Every structure is written in structure tokens, then in C-alpha cells.
């Protein structure tokens, strides 16, 4: 009976507590959003500015990385086809600049340079382990170069929600402050703080979700490129080992040219 009396008292007294609220709520349109924007406090504005900067930064990274990864994938396929069709490593070295966006080119150029350095006058490799280390280092450097700015994307995806939560907390604090200064539990007293809290929360989610999704997609592409770099490094080393194991190993162009010059001098 006491609970029923309290409920009846609340229903009859509620209209008196909300007399300042308009009887018909207006739909949320452009003018309402402008009114909310004009009524935002300095903390909410600062939070929204930070989130806007983070959103622009994250979209810049996502679009830039997606474009560079697409070019790298296309050029890598072309470079692999040229590598598999070539008869000599010198032929690939002569045209490798055409496929420069591909990270495979860096692996080939660094490993081939070490291959030329390790080759003696008889076409034999002095230290095959050095070639393996060079290929691994080149693959790691190429992958690291493609991972630049990815940490910023992960940071924005993780921090944006907390920045929005900070605005939410400050909006709730503002709502309770307005409730305390007004002296009555009216919607007009708490509405500005609650609106700030909801807006900053939505803005934080709006920034964080694309950043996290973009980071996951780009990380998946990076794993694919890393696997392709490892496969190409092994294929390149196998080709060099086959050259070493052949009955007549062909020395690089420099050594061939030097030997022809020396023969001409002896004649």
C-alpha cells in the first residue's frame, strides 16, 4: 500500500516538476543541432576538436596505406612474373627499377648486391649464410617501411573512445552541477550536460570504429606482404644456390668484363 501511494504521488506531482518543458517535443533537425552546438561548453568543444583531428588523421592513414598496399601488391605480382621468366639475375637487376613500389625489389637489390660481393672470380659464393642474413634483413626493413604510421592508427582507435568518455563524464558532472544550482529536479537544469555527454560519446565511437576496422584490415594486408617477402627471399636464395651448384657458374657482369679485358691485354 505504501508503494502504491508513492507511485500515485509521483504521477500527480510529476507535471508540476516539469512545467517548464514544452508540451510537444520538437524533432531533432538542423536548427536543434545548431542550438546544441551553441550551448556546448569549453570542455565538450575541446573534446570534439581533438576527436576531429584524430578522425582526419586516421582517415588519412587508412586511405594512404590502402593505396600504397594496393600498388605494392600489383607491382609485386608483375615483378614475380618477370623474375620467373628471366634467364639471368642480371636481367632482373636491369629492369628492377620499373617495379620500385614493390617491397620485393628491395629484397632483390640488397641480396643481389651481396651476391655480387660474395662471388669470386670463378663464380663461386664465398659465404652463403651472408646472403641469407642479407635477404632476411632486407625483408624486415621493407616490412618496417610499410608499417610506418600504423601505430598512430592503433593509438587513435584505442584512445578515441576514452576521449569521448572523458567528455561524457564532464557532461554528467555539468548536469549534476546544473541540478544543484537550480534547486529543483527539472529537465532544463540537466539537459545541457546530458546533451554534451551524449554528443561526445557518439563522436568518440564515430572516430574509434573506422580506425580499429582500418587497422585490422591493413594489418591483414601486412601479414600477406610479409609472407610474400619470406617466400620470395627463399626463392631468390634457391636460385642463387642453383647457380652455385651448376657445373659452370656464371660470374656477374663486372667479373666477366674484367676477364675479357685481361684476355685482350694478354693478347
Image: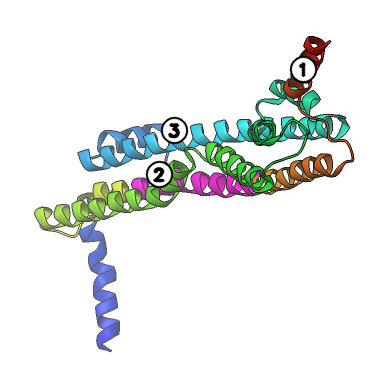
Q: Quadrant of the N terminus?
A: bottom left
The rendered magenta stretch, by its main secondary structure, is classed as helix
Task: Decide if residue 23 is in sight here.
Answer: no
Q: Secondary structure at mark 2?
A: helix
How far separated are the C-alphas under marks 3 and 1? Answer: 55 Å
Q: Is residue 233 above or below residue 66?
A: below
Neighbours of disc 2 within 10 Å: few (<14), some (14-19), many (20+): many
The percent coordinates of residue 12 (x first, y second) are: 26, 68
| N-term mark: 3 or 2 | 3
Q: Quadrant of residue 250?
A: top right
Give the numbered dot on residue 56: 3
How far separated are the C-alphas under marks 3 and 2? Answer: 13 Å
Q: Secondary structure at mark 3?
A: helix
Would you say the residues marked 1 and 2 are in contact, meaning their CB atoms lie under 8 Å apart? Answer: no
Q: Front-most of 225 and 94?
A: 94
Residue under pointer 1: 257
Please, which residue is most extreme toward the bottom here? 1
Residue under pointer 2: 203
Neighbours of disc 3 within 10 Å: few (<14), some (14-19), many (20+): few
Q: Is residue 85 left or right of residue 113?
A: right
| N-term mark: 1 or 2 | 2
The percent coordinates of residue 183 (x first, y second) are: 10, 57
Residue appearing at x 81%, y 15% in the figure: 263
Residue 200 part of the magenta segment: yes
How far separated are the C-alphas under marks 1 and 2? Answer: 67 Å
Q: Is residue 96 left or right of residue 25?
A: right
Residue appearing at x 90%, y 40% in the figure: 247
Q: Which residues are magenta?
A: 198-225
Amino acid at each position: 500500500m505504501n508503494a502504491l501511494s508513492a507511485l500515485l504521488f509521483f504521477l500527480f506531482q510529476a507535471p508540476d516538476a516539469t512545467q517548464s518543458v514544452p508540451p510537444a517535443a520538437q524533432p531533432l533537425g538542423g536548427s536543434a543541432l545548431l542550438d546544441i552546438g551553441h550551448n556546448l561548453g569549453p570542455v565538450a568543444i575541446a573534446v570534439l576538436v581533438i576527436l576531429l583531428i584524430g578522425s582526419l588523421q586516421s582517415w588519412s592513414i587508412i586511405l594512404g596505406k590502402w593505396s600504397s598496399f594496393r600498388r605494392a601488391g600489383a607491382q609485386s605480382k608483375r615483378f614475380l612474373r618477370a623474375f620467373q621468366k628471366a634467364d639471368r639475375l642480371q636481367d632482373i637487376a636491369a629492369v628492377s627499377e620499373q617495379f620500385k613500389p614493390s617491397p620485393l625489389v628491395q629484397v632483390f637489390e640488397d641480396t643481389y648486391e651481396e651476391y655480387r660481393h660474395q662471388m669470386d672470380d670463378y663464380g663461386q659464393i664465398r659465404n652463403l649464410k651472408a646472403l641469407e642474413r642479407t635477404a632476411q634483413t632486407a625483408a624486415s626493413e621493407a616490412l618496417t617501411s610499410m608499417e610506418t604510421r600504423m601505430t598512430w592508427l592503433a593509438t587513435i582507435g584505442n584512445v578515441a573512445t576514452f576521449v569521448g568518455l572523458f567528455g561524457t563524464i564532464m557532461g554528467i558532472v555539468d548536469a549534476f552541477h546544473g541540478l544543484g544550482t537550480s534547486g529543483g529536479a527539472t529537465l532544463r537544469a540537466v539537459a545541457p550536460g546530458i546533451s554534451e555527454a551524449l554528443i561526445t560519446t557518439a563522436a568518440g565511437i564515430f572516430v574509434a570504429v573506422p580506425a580499429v576496422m582500418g587497422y585490422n584490415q591493413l594489418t591483414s594486408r601486412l601479414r600477406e606482404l610479409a609472407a610474400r617477402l619470406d617466400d620470395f627471399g627463399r626463392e631468390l636464395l634457391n636460385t642463387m644456390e642453383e647457380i652455385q651448384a651448376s657445373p659452370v657458374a656464371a660470374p656477374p657482369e663486372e667479373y666477366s668484363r674484367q676477364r675479357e679485358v685481361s684476355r685482350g691485354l694478354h693478347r
